[in-house]
Amino acid sequence: MTVTIDEPLLRAVPSGRVAVAALARVEARHFLRSPFVWGGVVLAVGLGVAWSWTRMPTWDSFQQNAGMSALVLGAALLLAGHLAAGRDRRARADESTRSMPATAARRGVGLLVAVPIAALAGAVVYALELAILLPAWPVGHFDPWAGLVVVVLPPIGAAIGVLVGRALPSAAAGPLTVVALVVVLFLLLALSTGPGGPADQIWPVPEQPWEVGADRPTGWHLIYLCALLVGVVALISWHPGTGWRSWSGTAWRFGATSSVMVLVVALLVAGFAVQRQDAEDLSEVIYPDQTEALTGVAVLDCRTYLEVRYCALPEFANWARQWRAAVEPVAALLPVAAAKPAVRQIGGSDDFEPITPGQPEIVTSTSWGRFGRWAENSRLEMARAWSAAAVGLAKRDPMSWQSCDGAGQHRTVVGLWLLALTQPDGPARVARGELRLPHVRQGPADLQAVATLLAVPTAEVTAYLQAHWPQVLDPAGTALAGLGVTTTPPPIPAAPIVEPDSAPPSEDAGVCR
């Protein structure tokens, strides 16, 4: 009898590379179905958007918030990686996996597919956070290296999860590892000695720059994080049971030696990158000329609208639309001859020097409400500052942070009247006694005088101010008597002589001059 066999009974054993690729495809499908992966993406996006939701985004604040949300995603991917790596050794599953043709070494290497998936998840989180904030696009200096940190942090979490899962497969080891890493991060915060300290250099998310537009050594920080990732991957391939031992003795010795060499090089690179960060970080010693080069008058983007000059920091000019919405309603009520205060944006420090000496000016920061009550609060604060500057109650000098007594002065009444007319609930705030000018103390009689002005037609008041504006600006004048205002300004004492290096005795600057 003759038997013909069309196919061989025994198929060829696949090579290690083919087996690892097949295992990687299977692990990728499992990883993408993990609730920890998708739950981590949703949680990270939600937190990143929530942290950026109330303020107009800048690249510095957005990338820091995105970096912190990437830490959250990394924690979730650590749990997912730990569960995947410990699957074949939990609940006595190792008795079954020992009989499988795929060795532990190949299964361990196949699990590394979690690293590129985690990087993709980090990129998706970054893009979603950016898209949800539209149409408010971040302004300021864009640092691409800080953006890539968001892509690198989640793979580090996933790789740590795989490493712990292969070494400690018990279900509790993953959450305990997350808790341990959180404790380490809090210890870094506790050990931080200020900007530029060693703890700040190894903190996963780069700090915001010491000044708006300043360069940061984020490129070295990214190299440091990539070296950590390579080191964790080397540990995975070197760990017994996940490395190359089961392929053959010679192959395992060669693979273990290579892994150790990679680990040592990664640690050296990480240490060198941290050292370079510390050497290039300028936050410890800041000189005035460095600040002047970033936020000084020479680099401001100044534009004039309706006789008001708006000077923004580089790449912040789009915010002038928000500033105009706060200022122009007040400016429209001023007499033609009145000086219109300029609006100047400052960074982390203020030199208290006006752009044009002798001209009124107010300052604003790099923080502005994005919408709703947050934007309304920002508009109100700028309108308050601009109204005070328009009547001469806010000056650009080193003592401007102190409050002064403007009670009884008619210009205080005019400033409050300007503010009340330009706010949706201005008259109601006057009635409740809530309307105030910044750094100016006032009394009930001043708000009563404002209510008197509000009872007069607006056109009549503006015409009166047009005719008596120099008298209105006089701290000791009673120019509003013709409109029924009966408040009496207090005597204006002579200005005290203050030594340049002497500190004021209190926050009370006396009567507003």
Image: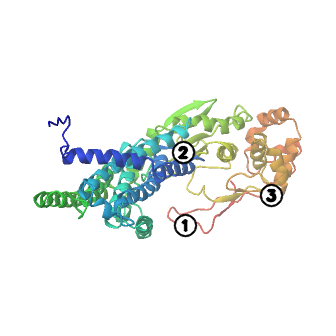
Q: Nearer the viewer, residue 348 or 59?
A: 59
Image vertical order of residue 422 relative to residue 497, above or below:
above
**Looking at the image, is mark 1 or mark 3 earlier in the sequence?**
3
Identify the disc placed on residue 503. 1
Disc 2, SS: loop
Judge from the rendering whether residue 28 lies leftward or rightward of residue 426; answer left or right.
Answer: left
Disc 1 marks a residue whose amino acid type is Ala
Image coordinates of residue 424 in percent, x first then y, are 77, 41
Of labels 2 and 3, the one closer to you: 3
Distance between the alpha carbons at the discs numbered 1 and 3? 28 Å
Q: Read off the residue under disc 2.
A: 354
Image vertical order of residue 317 relative to residue 476, above or below:
above
- Residue most toward the front? 1
Q: Residues within 10 Å of mark 3 (few under 14, many from 20)?
A: few
The residue that appears at 57% across and 52% down in the rendered structure is 397
Disc 3 marks a residue whose amino acid type is Gly
Image vertical order of residue 282 relative to residue 383, above or below:
below
Distance between the alpha carbons at the discs numbered 2 and 3? 30 Å
